[in-house]
Image (spheres, rainbow, N blue to C red):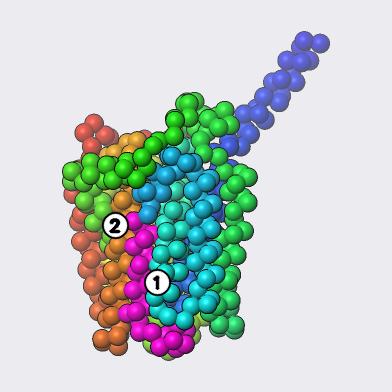
């Protein structure tokens, strides 16, 4: 009898060991949450032309509202990371989703540009900023020890997945029914995610009696008080170090050449050359598809290679592609444009896993908050180009100068990444099985 019992135990023990770790469930909920919150990011490029036609607002005026959203998205991220330490991930994210839904829904009644800035800029900016990459960094740092680079890549790709899902849908809605139903769709997308967050998200592995994936069990720390003060203190401490400014500066260029440039101005620029808005939106959605592949692969590479060299390669390739873009614009989608979309998509946010890895290497336990401030610089760069790109279009009637300037900036970012010094005693990344 004992022998039979032992045989049964031996038979079923491997199955218990293969049980999915709760960390992967939390990562899946985080992925879905970012998709829901990122739905709004599909709208600005689609709505510039309809709002310009409906209200007569200039490209610069609309671009300023988009830039306010992007700036607040970035500036709220480090405080959101600190608030998650104080009040928990679930509470902060649920409130953030509510802010996004409120701003998107309220915008359907706006009649003045200041309302656009209030709803899109303030409410949606604060809400999406609280679910930004600092959210991903907090989840990754708490729930994973092994596979951090891979998980970072997967969660970063969630934003692109939202773009892949919502861009074609919102473009079709805007084309057939106008911009207001598209705003309602975004509000509903944010609200649908709330039950998943509240029921399945957990703040810390110790809440369910587990160790982080690939690590040893640690007790849940007491809630951190003075969240805002801590965020500012971490900023001042990090600002005394050279790597922070190099990371922040290069990531500002990353934001300028992605969210501020392509996401905001690609569709109206393509429309200037005679391309239909739905066709241009479909191209952006394809960028989102290849972004998922590129970002996850970048996470895998970050676990194995020098993050500084990866960043330099990513920025250099992006800069070269942007220099060619003005020559590829046409009324119809040509093979050369498809090649650009695929190439650029693979590089879109591949910069995130190595940037986060460098923050973790340099700043340890404060890395999520430091990355929040680095992300703030990313969004400030995006905000400047979202606004200045619209101004350039108003003044010159073309976006060409913006593409060329962004390509040159990417070359600067590549050089900045290469001169970041490794922290004393740090070696090459270890391959984690």
- Membership of 56 in magenta stretch: yes
- Residue at 32% across, 67% down: 383
Which of these two is toward me, 98 or 166? 98
Residue at the disc numbered 2: 377
Q: Main secondary structure of the magenta part?
A: helix
Numbered range of the magenta stretch: 49-75
Which of these two is toward me, 100 or 361? 100
Q: Position of residue 99 (x, y in %)?
A: 50, 60
- Residue at 57% across, 28% down: 209
- Membership of 413 in magenta stretch: no
Residue at the disc numbered 1: 117
Residue that lies at the very extreme toward the top in this rendered image: 2
Q: Secondary structure at mark 1?
A: helix
Q: Is residue 340 visible?
A: no
Q: Quadrant of residue 12?
A: top right
Q: Secondary structure at mark 2?
A: helix
- Residue at 18% across, 43% down: 240
Seen in the picture, residue 64 relative to 415 is either above or below; the reply is below
The number of callouts visible is 2
């Amino acid at each position: 009898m004992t022998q039979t019992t032992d045989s049964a135990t031996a038979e079923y023990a491997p199955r218990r060991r293969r049980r999915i770790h709760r960390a992967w469930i939390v990562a899946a909920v985080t992925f879905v949450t970012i998709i829901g919150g990122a739905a709004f990011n599909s709208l600005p490029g689609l709505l510039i032309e309809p709002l310009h036609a409906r209200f007569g607002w200039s490209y610069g005026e609309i671009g300023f509202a988009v830039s306010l959203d992007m700036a607040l998205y970035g500036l709220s991220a480090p405080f959101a990371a600190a608030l998650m330490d104080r009040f928990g991930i679930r509470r902060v994210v649920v409130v953030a989703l509510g802010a996004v839904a409120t701003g998107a829904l309220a915008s359907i009644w706006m009649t003045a540009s200041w309302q656009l800035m209030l709803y899109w800029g303030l409410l949606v900016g604060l809400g999406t900023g609280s679910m930004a990459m600092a959210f991903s960094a907090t989840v990754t740092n708490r729930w994973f020890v092994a596979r951090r680079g891979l998980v970072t890549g997967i969660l970063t790709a969630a934003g692109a997945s939202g773009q892949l899902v919502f861009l074609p849908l919102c473009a079709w809605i805007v084309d057939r029914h106008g911009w207001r139903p598209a705003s309602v769709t975004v509000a509903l997308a944010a609200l649908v995610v709330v039950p998943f967050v509240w029921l399945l998200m957990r703040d810390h592995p110790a809440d369910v009696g587990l160790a982080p994936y690939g690590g040893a069990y640690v007790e849940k720390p007491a809630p951190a008080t003075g969240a805002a003060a801590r965020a500012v203190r971490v900023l001042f401490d990090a600002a005394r170090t050279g790597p922070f400014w190099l990371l922040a500066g290069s990531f500002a260029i990353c934001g300028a050449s992605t969210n501020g440039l392509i996401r905001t101005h690609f569709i109206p620029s393509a429309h200037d050359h005679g391309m239909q808005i739905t066709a241009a939106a479909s191209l952006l959605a394809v960028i989102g598809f290849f972004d998922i592949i590129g970002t996850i692969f970048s996470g895998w590479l970050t676990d194995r290679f020098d993050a500084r060299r990866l960043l330099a390669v990513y920025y250099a390739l992006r800069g070269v592609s942007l220099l060619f873009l003005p020559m590829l614009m046409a009324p119809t989608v040509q093979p050369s444009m498809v090649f650009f979309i695929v190439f650029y998509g693979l590089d879109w946010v591949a910069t995130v896993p190595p940037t986060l890895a460098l923050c973790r290497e340099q700043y340890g336990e404060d890395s999520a908050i430091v990355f929040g401030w680095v992300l703030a610089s990313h969004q400030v760069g995006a905000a400047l180009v979202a606004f200045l790109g619209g101004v350039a279009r108003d003044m010159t009637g073309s976006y060409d100068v913006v593409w060329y300037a962004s390509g040159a900036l990417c070359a600067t970012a590549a050089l900045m990444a290469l001169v970041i010094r490794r922290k004393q005693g740090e070696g090459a990344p270890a391959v984690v099985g």
